[in-house]
Image: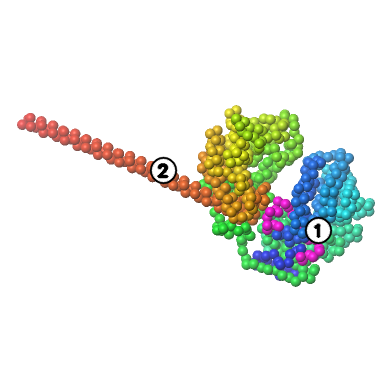
Amino acid sequence: MRFNNILSLIATSSVALADVSLREAAKDFRIGVAANTLKFNNEAYLEAVNQFNYMVAENGCKLSGIQPQKGVFTFDDCDAHLAKAEELGMDFRGHCLIWHSWQPQWFQDITDPEEMEKTIVNHVTTVLNHYKGKIDTWDIVNEAIDDESTGENGTWDMRDTFLYRALPNFVDVAFKTAREVDPSVKLFYNDYDIEGDDIRKGMKTNAVYNFVKDLVDRGVPIDGVGLQYHLHTDKTVQYDNVMKTMRRFKDLGLEVQITEMDVNSVEGKTEESFALQAKLYGEGLKACLDSENCTGFLIWGVGDSDSWRKEGYPLAFNSDYTPKPAYYAMLDVLKEYNNIEDEVETEAPSDDKPSEPVKDEPAKDEEVEAVRDLANGFRIGVAANTLRFNDEAYINATKKFNYMVAENGCKLSGIQPQKGVFTFDDCDAHLAKAEELGMDFRGHCLIWHSWQPQWFQDITDPEEMEKTIVNHVTTVLNHYKGKIDTWDIVNEAIDDESTGENGTWDMRDTFLYRALPNFVDVAFKTAREVDPSVKLFYNDYDIEGDDIRKGMKTNAVYNFVKDLVDRGIPIDGVGLQYHLHTDKTVQYDNVMKTMRRFNELGLEVQITEMDVNSVEGKTEESFALQAKLYGEGLKACLDSENCTGFLIWGVGDSDSWRKEGYPLAFNSDYTPKPAYYALVNTLKEYNAEKSEEDVDVVESDNEEAENVDNDNVEEVEDSADEENAVEADVEDAEDSADDEEN
């Protein structure tokens, strides 16, 4: 294979995508990638995806994505993946119907064999019927064989999972059901470490072969085996051994596909390690092409920072979606296999990342002023996500701020996914990154009705709900005592349709309120008892003033919070989320008025989740209005004596929960947008105004001092005149006495 010319080229320059894409070089062979809808608004991401002709959803088509609650099927995310594949002219692969890992609690809790069988049959039937005629290949079962299986004497060991414990023949049930529902679909079993004798001395390969052969021998319908092909640069496979494995399955009459390839670069981002990584990608693809029963080759992710193994830079594209040596190794293999001439364009070396055009913006990160350097101790921050912490551009953007909040990692769903089982890993990782970058950290949020685990939503008994809230608040605040000084205790408890008339408010009708109407009181009181030093905030949206819903929800939340204060419920502040659109704006004066109202209650405020959807898309005019709104929001906070922090809800546009509106201060490649420069300019103007005020104060003090000095001089002069007058009177008296003596 011809790797050397490609690798030497990459070592000396950045490489543009070739004139011939992988999909063009592949002709009819399926070469694909695992995609994620969270990235579909990122142009560079889609350009990379479009180099392939085959797509699989990383998570969106799994049971956890389609049936998060028992019997409630939600196809939105899987449908979105399929629609994008169709839009890009790509075939689509289904992954995966039945798996033991990353499953909702309701599924894991099933122990009755009959219930488990009914559940598997229902899921397989519903999903395959929904996608009948649209998806021609599915992983029916994923990773059912134990890692320690030796494969000796034709044996295998099933993985000890909730599936196997409840229904030992669950694999048979799943495959048989699939064939009955849609006879046209290719049914695959998918597993890892089964590429041949190089991995675990071939033991798991042998075990899976024995397991699959048994299915075939017993007439259980199966059409293929997926070799996941997760490697490291120090855990490699030989071409000959992979070919041998593929031939073994061919002898059973089965197809194979390489389904999830990635190769961790153990030595990091070095030229040598990336060259070895490229070699392994090329050899894996070549083995598949050379095996007559290998019908597809897929990589498990697009850019390195998207990967579940991101620390190893394992994929074929960099985090900014520029191609790596691995990409060109695959292209080279396809060209050689299909006798296509080699055409590669190069560009001059550059450190710049592709970005959306913005007027008068510096291209290099080091030229961009950090708002933290202009804030003079004022907290200006951003919501972060640990999934991006290995992306250098993401971190460079994040550390321009001095305040961090975790987007999801510190919520109840992240910390207590199972009742009574506390997992602080993700929240701890956010806090550790903030400390590493010299940023303060804000806690969000302890109690909320949305995006909660099913066990929490199922609580209806008031006593149990109170105990659960007390336990969660107590455990979390004790864990972070002395580390986090501000927490959103309760999030979004007030109904959107509240009018706020006559001092009223309406509570949102949630499982929390239905089980325990005074849940807000319980949460705040518990928080104060556990850590009296923490600032306790209530957080909500559409409460920025009269411009939003005619001020009705603002009034309702004000009334609600005032009632807490009047009743002595401990609360220190209110978070204004500040989610806007370029056609749903707020006026500076109205925001100031809202902040003053809370100030009169003795409360702080913070702008906690600002983002501004660009309704008109990525236009210069819309981004200018977006920037204006960011600047005015920050100015209102700076000008309000009780506003103690300002946070944006995300870093780059493609990270946002509202990504379709390009709502944040950085582009998807983490280059700054006009909104970021609006924040910079607002801080500069504020600092200049403060400096002028300080000068005025100094000048005023000097004038007063000068006036005092002048008064003192006059007093001294008057005193001297008086002394002179006295002396003159004495002299006159003495002269008069002399005259009398004479």
Q: Is residue 715 above or below residue 203?
A: above
Element marked by disc 2? helix
| Region in magenta | 24-46
Residue 669 in sight? yes
Q: Amino acid at mark 2?
A: Val
On the image, the x and y values in percent for residue 328 come to 72, 65
Q: Is residue 42 magenta?
A: yes
Of circles 1 and 2, which is in front? 2
Task: Characterize the local packing of mark 2: few (<14), some (14-19) or many (20 or more) Cα atoms within 10 angstroms.
Answer: few
Residue ID for mark 1 = 258
- Residue 471: percent from left, percent from top: 69, 34
Q: How is the image coloured?
A: rainbow
Residue drawn at 84 percent across, 46 percent down:
126
Q: Which residue is mark 2?
A: 697
Magenta highlight on residue 205: no
Would residue 49 appear left or right of 485 to someone viewing this image? right
Horizontal and vertical percent for residue 452? 72, 40
**Left or right side of 135 for 566:** left
State the image quarter where residue 199 is shown.
Answer: bottom right
